[in-house]
Image (cartoon, coloured by chain):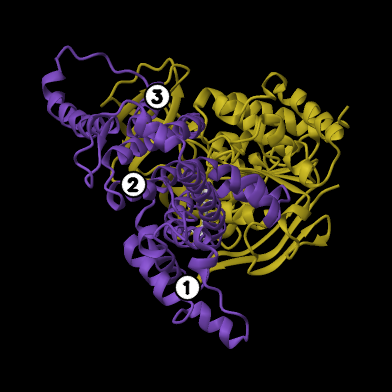
Chain colours: A purple, B yellow
């Protein structure tokens, strides 16, 4: 993932004019940080790869040694992996839809002048500063809890049946929580982008007869395209590895209903003490992330570059 | 037919009054130019006409119809912005067709009109490009094209050429003049540039501090400025001003005592002017020339040779600097002492409150108007 993004940003920098090459050899100066970063990346990756080819279960230390593709075939034939993969993509997709959609609308709203805009902006940004664990706990115990939760209180006072979110809609609940956390990020980026829209362009559109809707679809949305790409790219990177929210709320359940890849690896490695299997899961996660990256980041980076 | 009439138009931002009562009538097919120092309210006035800025009080009429509360798109105006304000994600053709698209004009008709406008502006080969692939002059032409396709009653321009380099500005200026003749449309144009104002305008409106100082043909403003401000603002280099005392008043003019002793009879209708009054004598650099028989003695401090003409910045003892436009051939050097000749016919007199004393002879070209354009073919 990291290497992907850095190559794409290098690609964007390429068309810029090259200043004449310096004759100084910069390698000695660059090497410490490059070597450090390389080790930082390669050591865990190499260890993961190594373990993924070993029988290594902490509960049964007597079974050890080279496993060949066993860990992988075990995982890939395990229906849990496919469920987790689908859950991962589902979660990423819907959180992106919600944050980008709502973020755009809120950005348009917060771009208007209204009384108390400063406070409203601050409140809208605030969720981003809450730790994922904490916000998930708040959602779990104070909002979505079927007995103590605020939502339950509302539906009870309206005489409606109480919804047990984490039992009935586990993945949806996780999606709501994660979307709530990432909405401020989308909003922040999109609001800055909206504010950079040339004032005269909007006035020109007004003179051309654009009402609020035409203004949004023909002027504001195209202007935001680039910022939306950035939001999608950055959020995808982080959303592929959502963990704390699941750990705190549903623990991946009921069954595997809200288990994503990161959580599955955790289940294998720490619940079942199967380091080998978990490492194989990690490698699969890296591969999946790179597949997403190739499709998504490439196309978006191209969009940003031009 | 498209006339624009402003009646006692005012504009306040909060407590600050920016436009302080403007009365103006812009005729059909007139090219009207707003000039004035920075911050005098030119853009604000234009934006009020466009409908982008609310009118605090007063009446704005287009074609005799009050449009104070009509939204911008329905006033039948088109505006060209200083920064062009093209839509960056649309091609040139889409940029130009945008207003028609919003108005629900069919695709065919839209592109027919775009092609027509593109032909006039020589934009045909560029129709499929994005704005960022165009040069500044081309972008400007697209912005004008976007205005043309709407077939507006009035074109509004806010310093449209100020982002272009000098050579391109001259070229675009000529194209604008051609375009005005071709389209036969009413145009209102804001500029900082003297030359643009003088060359393009049928009517120049000089604004200062939110009020109209004078409105008239370019040569009327040049030959018959109403006050010191207009006299100083129109013309480059600026008109020279000398403080003098009136020594005698007759029907044929007022005789003033020049610094240095000589006296000069300026042909004006003296009105309430009487001997002993303090007045300001104004004379343009191009109406002064070095001459043996000159009335004013001065020392040359700076010489600017432009080739065809030479500007002499002369120190007049006890008075100040005087700019003289001399022939390009003069050999005068810095620190030479020269005599400067005044022609009384070209002199202006201003009373102590800054108002011009009416000149006796009206300049024959002051009321010259552009011949009414032929019908556009
Ligand atoms: N939105 C606004 N709020 C408050 N004051 C404003 C606003 N717009 C303009 N002004 C003030 O109104 C005055 C006139 O502004 P305007 O833009 O019309 O000047 P201008 O003649 O176009 O100047 P320039 O030649 O520099 O473009 C200025 O003093 C400016 O500070
Ligand atoms: Mg302005």
Callouts 2 and 3 on one subunit? yes
State the SS at label 1: loop
Given residues B287 and B244, the one toward you in this image is B287
Q: Reply above or below: A130 against A88.
A: below
Instruction: Tell me: B303 left or right of A42.
Output: right
The answer to whether the beta carbon of the residue marked 1 is less than 8 Å from any atom of ligand 1 is: no
The reply, left or right, for residue A162 in relation to residue A81 is right
Residue at 34 percent across and 28 percent down: it is B338
- Identified at 39% across, 38% down, the residue is A285
In the displayed structure image, the side of residue B99 where residue A218 appears, left or right: left
What is the crowding at mark 1: few (fewer than 14 residues within 10 Å), some, or many (at least 20)? Answer: many
x 14%, y 24%: residue: A31
Residue at mark 1 to residue at mark 3: CA–CA distance: 45 Å
* The quadrant where residue A244 appears: bottom left
The label on residue A144 is 1
**Residue at x 18%, y 30% (from the top left corner):** A39
Instruction: Find out whether the residues at labels 1 and 2 contact each other: C-beta distance under 8 Å.
Output: no
- Cα distance, mark 1 to mark 2? 28 Å
Image location of residue A222, percent across then percent down: 59, 42
Q: Which residue is mark 3?
A: A11
Crowding near pointer 2: few (<14 within 10 Å), some, many (20+)?
Answer: many
- Whether labels 1 and 2 share one chain: yes
């Amino acid at each position: 993932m990291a290497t992907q993004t850095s190559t794409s940003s290098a690609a964007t920098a390429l068309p810029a004019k090259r200043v004449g090459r310096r004759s100084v050899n910069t390698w000695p100066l660059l090497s410490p940080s490059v070597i450090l970063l390389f080790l930082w990346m390669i050591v865990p990756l190499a260890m993961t790869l190594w373990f993924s080819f070993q029988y290594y279960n902490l509960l049964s230390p007597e079974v050890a040694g080279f496993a060949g593709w066993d860990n992988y075939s075990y995982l890939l034939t395990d229906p849990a992996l496919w469920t987790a993969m689908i859950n991962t993509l589902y979660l990423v997709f819907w959180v992106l839809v919600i944050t980008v959609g709502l973020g755009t609308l809120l950005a348009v709203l917060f771009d208007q002048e209204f009384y108390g805009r400063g406070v409203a902006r601050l409140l809208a940004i605030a969720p981003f500063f809450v730790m994922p664990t904490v916000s998930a706990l708040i959602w779990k115990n104070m909002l979505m809890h079927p007995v103590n939760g605020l939502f339950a209180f509302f539906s009870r006072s309206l005489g409606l049946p109480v919804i047990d979110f984490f039992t009935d809609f586990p993945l949806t609940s996780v999606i709501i929580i994660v979307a709530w956390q990432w909405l401020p990020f989308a909003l922040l980026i999109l609001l800055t982008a909206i504010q950079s829209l040339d004032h005269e362009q909007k006035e020109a559109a007004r003179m051309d007869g654009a009402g609020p809707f035409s203004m949004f679809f023909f002027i504001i949305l195209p202007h935001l395209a680039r910022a939306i790409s950035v939001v999608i790219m950055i959020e995808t990177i982080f959303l592929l590895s959502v963990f704390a929210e699941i750990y705190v709320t549903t623990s991946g359940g009921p069954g595997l209903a809200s288990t994503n890849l990161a959580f599955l690896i955790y289940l294998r490695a720490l619940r079942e003490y199967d380091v080998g299997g978990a490492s194989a899961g990690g490698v699969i996660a890296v591969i999946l992330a790179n597949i997403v990256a190739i499709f998504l980041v490439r196309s978006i980076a191209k969009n940003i570059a031009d | 037919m498209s006339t624009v009439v402003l009646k006692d138009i005012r504009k306040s931002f909060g407590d600050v009054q920016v436009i302080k009562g403007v009365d103006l009538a812009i005729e059909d097919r007139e090219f009207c130019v707003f000039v004035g120092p920075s911050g005098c309210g030119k853009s604000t006035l234009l934006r009020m006409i466009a409908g982008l800025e609310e009118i605090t009080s007063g009446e704005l009429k287009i074609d005799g119809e009050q449009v104070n509360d009509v939204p911008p798109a329905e006033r039948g105006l088109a505006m060209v912005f200083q920064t062009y304000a093209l839509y960056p994600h649309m091609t040139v053709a889409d940029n130009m067709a945008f207003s028609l698209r919003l108005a629900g004009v069919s695709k065919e008709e839209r592109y027919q009109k775009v092609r027509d406008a593109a032909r006039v502006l020589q934009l045909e080969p560029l129709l499929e490009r994005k704005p960022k692939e165009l040069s500044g002059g081309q972008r400007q032409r697209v912005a004008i094209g976007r205005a043309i396709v709407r077939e507006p009653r009035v074109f509004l321009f806010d310093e449209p050429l100020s982002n272009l380099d000098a050579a391109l500005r001259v070229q675009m200026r000529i194209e604008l003049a051609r375009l005005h003749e071709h389209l036969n449309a009413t145009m209102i144009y804001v500029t900082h540039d003297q030359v643009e104002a003088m060359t393009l305008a049928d009517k120049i409106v000089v604004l200062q501090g939110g009020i109209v100082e004078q409105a008239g043909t370019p040569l009327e403003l040049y030959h018959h400025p109403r006050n010191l401000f207009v006299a100083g603002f129109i013309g480059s280099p600026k008109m020279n001003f000398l403080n003098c005392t009136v020594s005698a008043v007759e029907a044929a003019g007022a005789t003033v005592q020049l610094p240095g002793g000589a006296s000069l009879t300026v042909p004006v209708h003296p009105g309430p002017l009487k001997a002993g009054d303090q007045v300001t004598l104004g004379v343009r650099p191009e109406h002064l020339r070095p001459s043996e028989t000159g009335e004013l003695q001065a020392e040359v401090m700076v010489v600017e040779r432009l080739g065809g003409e030479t500007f002499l910045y002369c120190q007049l003892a006890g008075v100040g600097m005087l700019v003289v436009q001399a022939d390009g051939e003069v050999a005068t050097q810095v620190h030479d002492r020269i005599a400067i000749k005044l022609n009384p016919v070209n002199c202006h007199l201003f009373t102590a409150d800054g108002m011009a004393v009416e000149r006796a002879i009206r300049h024959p070209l002051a009321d010259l108007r552009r011949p009414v354009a032929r019908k556009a073919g």
